[in-house]
C-alpha cells in the first residue's frame, strides 16, 4: 500500500491520475472515444509532433533547447516538394531531405559546441532561418506533386489499422527508452545535463555528445517533415508553424526539468497521452482549437504550480503534526 | 582567558535536537556563547556543525530544544529573523552580488529606506566601517573584482552594519593564503574586543583554532562532547575527543623509499599570463608535492597537464615520448588523471548514484558492443572500491551528494583509480574533510605510491606537503621557485621560497 502511495506522490503518479480522469471523462462524454479508429486517428493527427518530442527529451535533459525543430520540419517538407517538382527522383529527394536535416542540426551544434553560444539563441536564429528558406523554396504556392505510393504511405494503414508514421514513432520510442536507460550515451546525457563541468573534468567528450544530439534533432525533424508531407499530400511554407511550442510543452509537462539532468521518457509518454486525449476529447465535444490551446497552456502552468503547492501543503501538515505532539 | 563577560550569555543553545529521515543530526546539544569571546566549534564531518549553524541562522528549525538570546527565548524561522536578532554568518565562499559595488553589497538588505537611496551617506558609512576594520577596499569597486579575502571583509562589514552580536564564521580560512588568514584573525579579534561580538569559529585547521579561540566546543556524531577553555586543551586531547579514539599521528610517517625510473619529464611548460617555465621530472612511485600560496597557479599547471587548459609552449614527455595533451580525453588515454579540488562544481554529479559516479570516467570499459552498460560488472567495480577504500554509504545506489565530504572524496579517488592511471594529479586531496578521513586519505596516497603510481600532490596545507612528498616543487605567482628534496625541506625553507626568496634549484 505504501509503495502505491509513494508512486502516487511522484510526478508520474500525478500524471497517471490526470490521464485516468481524462480517459474517464472522455469515454463518458463520447462512445467513440475508445474506438480503435478514433485512437489511431488522434495519434495520426499529431504523430509528427510526438516523434520530435522524443529527441527533444534528450536535448532538454542535456540542459539545452532546440527551437528550430518545427522550422526544420517545414524546410524538409518544402524541400521535398521543390525537389520533386523540379524533377528529382522521389527516393533521391527523400535522401536529400534527411541530409538537409543532418546538416541543419549539425550547423546548430557547431555554433553551440565550438563557439559556446547558448542554444536558445542559436536555434532561435535557425527557427527564423529554416522557415525563411522553406518560404523561399515554395513561395506562396501549395505544391502537390508526390507520387501516389508516397501519399498512400502517409495515409493508408500498413499493419492492420496502423499507419507507417505510428510504427515509426513506436520504433523510435523503444529506441529512445533503450538509449536513455541502458546505454553509456544515455548516462552521459544525464551527467552533462546535471553538471557539464563534471562531465568535462571526467574526460567525457561533451561537445561530441551535444553535436550528436543536435544533428539527430535535425534528422528526426526532417523525417517528421517528410511524414507530414506524405500525410497531407502537399506542402506549404507554413507547415508545422509554431509546433515547437507544443513539442516543448509535452516534454516539460512530462516532468523533464528545463534545467537539465532530471526526468524520464515515461513521464513524457504520459504527458503526450494527456495532451492528445484532452485535445481529442474537446474536439469530440466541439470545443474550438483556440480554447483547446488555452487549456493545454493552463495545464503547463499547473504542472509547474502543483509540485510547489504540494510541497507547501506537505510542510504545513508536518508542522501541524509536530505542534500537536 | 580574558573574557570581558558579564555572566549573561548572549546566545544559549539548550538541548537542541534535529533529525533528518534516518539520521539524528543533533541530539540534545547545548552551547553558551558570551559577548566578547571567540568560540571554536570543531568536529569531524557529519558531527553536526553545519546543522547547528543552519538552525542558528534560521535556515532550518530544530525539532526540540530552545534558543535564548540574552536570556529570552526566541524562535528563528528564517534568515531575515536571524539578521534582526543580530546573528550573521560568513562562509568559505562569500555570497556577494558580483555586479553591485562594495557599498551596495554592505547595505543590500537595509538601505536607508525612503524613495531615493542616499548614495553619499551609504558610501561614507561603508568607508567608515571598512577603515574601522583596517581593510583598504575602494567602496566604489564592484564585488566581482575582489579577492576572496576582500569579499569576506565585505561580508563582515555587512554584519557590522547590521549590529551583529553573534557572528558565525564557517570555515572562513579554507581558501585563504596565510597572509589573508592573519588579516582575518586581526579583524576577528578587533570585533571581539571593540564591539564585544561573540564569534563562533569553525575550521578544520586545528592550528588556527589554537591560535584564535578562547573556548572550544567539540561535537561528535551530533552530540555535545565537551566545551573547554583553550588553556586546558591540547592538540592530542582535542583530536581524541573529535574522533573518539587515539590518533597516533596526524600524518602517516613517510617511509623513505626508492623511487623508480623516470616516467614523465616536463620542460619549460608555459601559459601566457598564467605560469612560466615549469620544469620537473616525475618517477615511478614518486610523490611530488606542489607547494605555494594561493595565486601561485599550481592548479593551472595541473589543468594544463590534464588538457583542460593546455599550455602554450614547452613539452611534456611520457615514457620518453613527447606527447601533446590537448583534451582531457587524450590525458585519460595517456594515463594521466586529475582529481579536482572542487568536488561540488567539477568533481561529482551530486544527484547521481555512487556507482555511476565511480564509473563515469571509465564507462567505456563497461559497454558491450551495442553501447549498453553491463550493470553487473559496473556494480562489481563499485563494490570493490567501496571495500578497498572503505566508502561509508548505506547503498551504492545512494545519491553521492548525501555522503560526507570524506566519503565523497573517496568516491572521486575511486573514479580516477578505475581509469588505471600512471600519473595522478591530486588537487587539494584533503580540503574540507575531517581529521579521521584525512589520515585515511594520506595512508591511501602512500599505498598508491608504494604500488608504483606516480603522484603530483597540490596542497595548501604545508605540514601535509612536507609529510607526504618525496620532493616538493614550490611555485610563486606562476613561476617555479625551486624543487626541494623532502629531507632538506622545512616549513621555513618552503615558505621562504613560496614568498619569494629564490635559492638554488636542485
Image: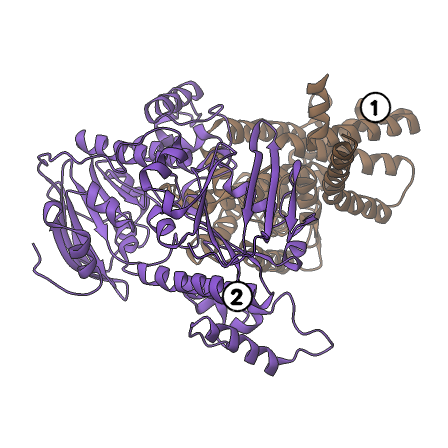
Chain colours: A brown, B purple
Residue occupying the far bottom of the picture: B120
Identify the residue shown where x is 58% and y is 68%: B161
Q: Nearer the viewer, residue A145 or A20?
A: A20
B151 left or right of B320 in image: right
In x, y percent, where is residue B331? 27, 43
Quadrant in which residue B340 is drawn = top left
Judge whether B190 appears above or below B302 on screen.
below
Quadrant of residue A223 in the image? top right
Category of crowding for the residue at label 1, using alpha-carbon neighbours closer than 10 angstroms: few (below 14), some (14–19), many (at least 20): few
Placement of A320 over or under B202, stated as above or below: above
Q: Which residue was labeled with disc 1?
A: A34
Q: How many marks?
A: 2
Chain of the residue where label 2 is placed in the rendered structure: B
Which numbered mark, 2 or 1, is in the foreground of this view? 2
* CA distance for labels 2 and 1: 77 Å
Q: Are marks 2 and 1 on the same chain?
A: no
Q: Which mark is residue B1?
A: none
Along the viewing direction, whichever of B188 and B102 lies nearer the viewer: B188
Query: Which residue is situated farthest in the front direction here?
Result: B7
Observer-nearest of B506 and A182: B506
Question: What x and y, as percent, mark residue B201?
Answer: 46, 51
Give percent across and percent down for residue A54.
61, 37
Is A140 left, or right, of B222 in this rendering? right
> Which residue is label 2 attached to?
B195
Q: What secondary structure is found at the residue carrying circle 1?
A: helix
Quadrant that contains the N terminus of chain B? bottom left
Q: Position of residue A32 (x, y in %)?
A: 88, 26
Q: Is residue B337 above or below residue B398?
A: below
Nearest the eye: B40 or B118: B40
Q: Where on the picture, by quarter, is residue B184? A: bottom left
Amino acid at each position: 500500500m505504501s509503495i502505491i502511495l509513494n508512486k502516487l506522490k511522484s510526478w508520474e503518479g500525478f500524471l497517471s491520475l490526470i490521464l485516468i480522469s481524462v480517459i474517464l471523462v472522455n469515454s463518458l462524454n463520447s462512445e467513440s472515444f475508445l474506438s480503435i479508429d478514433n485512437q489511431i486517428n488522434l495519434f495520426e493527427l499529431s504523430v509528427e509532433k510526438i516523434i520530435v518530442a522524443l529527441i527533444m527529451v534528450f536535448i532538454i535533459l542535456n540542459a539545452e533547447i532546440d527551437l528550430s525543430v518545427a522550422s526544420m520540419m517545414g524546410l524538409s517538407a518544402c524541400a521535398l516538394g521543390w525537389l520533386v517538382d523540379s524533377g528529382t527522383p522521389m527516393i533521391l529527394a527523400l535522401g536529400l531531405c534527411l541530409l538537409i536535416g543532418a546538416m541543419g542540426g549539425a550547423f546548430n551544434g557547431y555554433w553551440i559546441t565550438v563557439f559556446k553560444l547558448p542554444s536558445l539563441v542559436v536555434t532561435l536564429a535557425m527557427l527564423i532561418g529554416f522557415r525563411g528558406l522553406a518560404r523561399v523554396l515554395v513561395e506562396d504556392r501549395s505544391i502537390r506533386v508526390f507520387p501516389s505510393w508516397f501519399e498512400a504511405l502517409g495515409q493508408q494503414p500498413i499493419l492492420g489499422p496502423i499507419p507507417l508514421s505510428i510504427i515509426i514513432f513506436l520504433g523510435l520510442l523503444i529506441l529512445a527508452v533503450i538509449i536513455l536507460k541502458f546505454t553509456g550515451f544515455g548516462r552521459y546525457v544525464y551527467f552533462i545535463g546535471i553538471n557539464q563541468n563534471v562531465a568535462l573534468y571526467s574526460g567525457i567528450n561533451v561537445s561530441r555528445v551535444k553535436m550528436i544530439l543536435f544533428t539527430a534533432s535535425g534528422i528526426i525533424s526532417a523525417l517528421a517533415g517528410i511524414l507530414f508531407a506524405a500525410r497531407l499530400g502537399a506542402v506549404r511554407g507554413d507547415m508545422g508553424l509554431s509546433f515547437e511550442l507544443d513539442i516543448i510543452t509535452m516534454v516539460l509537462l512530462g516532468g523533464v526539468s528545463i534545467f537539465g539532468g532530471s526526468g524520464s521518457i515515461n513521464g513524457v509518454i504520459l504527458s503526450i497521452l494527456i495532451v492528445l486525449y484532452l485535445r481529442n476529447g474537446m474536439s469530440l465535444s466541439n470545443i474550438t482549437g483556440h480554447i483547446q490551446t488555452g487549456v493545454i497552456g493552463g495545464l503547463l502552468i499547473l504542472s509547474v504550480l502543483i509540485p510547489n503547492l504540494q510541497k507547501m501543503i506537505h510542510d504545513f501538515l508536518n508542522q501541524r503534526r509536530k505542534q500537536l505532539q | 582567558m580574558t573574557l570581558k563577560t558579564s555572566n549573561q550569555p548572549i546566545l544559549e543553545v539548550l538541548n537542541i535536537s534535529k533529525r533528518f529521515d534516518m539520521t539524528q543530526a543533533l541530539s540534545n546539544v547545548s552551547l553558551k556563547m558570551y559577548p566578547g569571546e571567540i568560540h571554536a566549534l570543531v568536529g569531524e564531518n557529519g558531527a553536526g556543525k553545519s546543522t547547528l549553524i543552519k538552525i542558528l541562522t534560521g535556515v532550518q528549525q530544530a525539532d526540540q530544544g530552545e534558543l535564548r538570546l540574552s536570556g529570552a527565548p526566541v524562535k528563528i524561522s528564517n534568515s531575515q529573523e536571524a539578521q534582526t536578532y543580530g546573528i550573521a554568518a560568513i562562509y568559505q565562499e562569500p555570497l556577494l552580488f558580483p555586479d553591485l559595488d562594495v557599498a551596495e553589497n554592505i547595505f543590500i538588505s537595509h538601505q536607508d529606506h525612503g524613495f531615493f537611496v542616499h548614495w553619499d551617506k551609504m558610501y561614507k558609512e561603508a568607508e567608515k566601517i571598512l577603515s574601522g576594520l583596517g581593510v583598504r577596499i575602494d567602496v566604489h569597486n564592484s564585488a566581482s573584482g575582489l579577492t576572496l579575502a576582500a569579499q569576506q571583509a565585505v561580508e563582515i562589514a555587512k554584519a557590522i552594519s547590521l549590529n551583529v552580536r553573534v557572528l558565525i564564521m564557517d570555515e572562513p580560512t579554507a581558501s585563504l593564503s596565510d597572509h589573508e588568514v592573519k588579516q582575518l584573525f586581526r579583524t576577528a579579534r578587533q570585533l571581539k574586543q571593540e564591539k564585544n561580538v561573540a564569534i563562533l569559529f569553525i575550521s578544520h585547521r586545528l592550528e588556527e583554532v589554537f591560535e584564535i579561540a578562547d573556548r572550544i566546543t567539540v561535537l561528535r556524531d551530533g552530540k555535545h562532547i565537551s566545551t573547554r577553555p583553550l588553556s586546558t586543551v591540547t592538540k592530542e586531547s582535542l583530536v581524541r575527543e573529535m574522533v573518539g579514539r587515539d590518533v597516533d599521528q596526524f600524518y602517516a610517517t613517510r617511509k623513505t623509499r626508492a623511487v623508480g625510473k623516470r616516467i614523465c619529464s616536463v620542460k619549460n611548460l608555459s601559459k601566457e599570463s598564467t605560469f612560466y617555465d615549469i620544469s620537473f621530472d616525475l618517477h615511478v612511485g614518486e610523490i611530488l608535492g606542489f607547494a605555494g600560496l594561493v595565486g601561485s597557479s599550481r592548479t593551472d599547471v595541473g589543468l594544463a597537464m590534464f588538457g583542460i587548459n593546455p599550455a602554450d609552449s614547452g613539452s611534456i614527455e611520457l615514457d620518453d615520448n613527447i606527447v601533446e595533451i590537448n583534451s582531457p580525453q587524450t590525458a585519460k588515454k595517456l594515463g594521466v588523471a586529475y582529481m579536482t579540488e572542487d568536488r561540488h562544481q567539477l568533481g561529482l554529479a551530486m544527484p547521481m548514484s555512487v556507482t555511476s559516479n565511480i564509473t563515469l570516467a571509465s564507462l567505456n570499459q563497461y559497454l558491450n558492443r551495442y553501447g549498453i552498460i553491463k550493470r553487473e560488472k559496473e556494480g562489481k567495480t563499485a563494490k570493490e572500491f567501496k571495500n578497498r577504500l572503505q566508502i561509508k554509504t548505506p547503498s551504492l545506489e545512494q545519491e553521492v551528494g548525501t555522503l560526507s565530504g570524506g566519503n565523497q572524496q573517496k568516491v572521486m579517488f575511486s573514479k580516477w583509480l578505475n581509469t588505471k592511471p600512471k600519473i595522478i594529479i591530486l588537487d587539494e586531496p584533503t580540503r574540507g574533510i575531517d581529521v579521521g578521513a584525512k589520515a585515511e586519505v594520506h595512508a591511501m596516497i602512500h599505498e598508491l605510491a608504494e604500488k608504483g603510481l606516480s603522484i603530483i600532490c597540490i596542497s595548501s596545507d604545508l605540514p601535509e606537503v612536507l609529510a607526504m612528498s618525496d620532493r616538493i616543487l614550490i611555485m610563486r605567482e606562476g613561476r617555479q621557485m625551486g624543487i626541494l628534496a623532502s629531507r632538506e625541506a622545512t616549513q621555513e625553507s618552503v615558505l621562504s621560497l613560496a614568498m619569494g626568496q629564490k635559492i638554488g634549484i636542485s
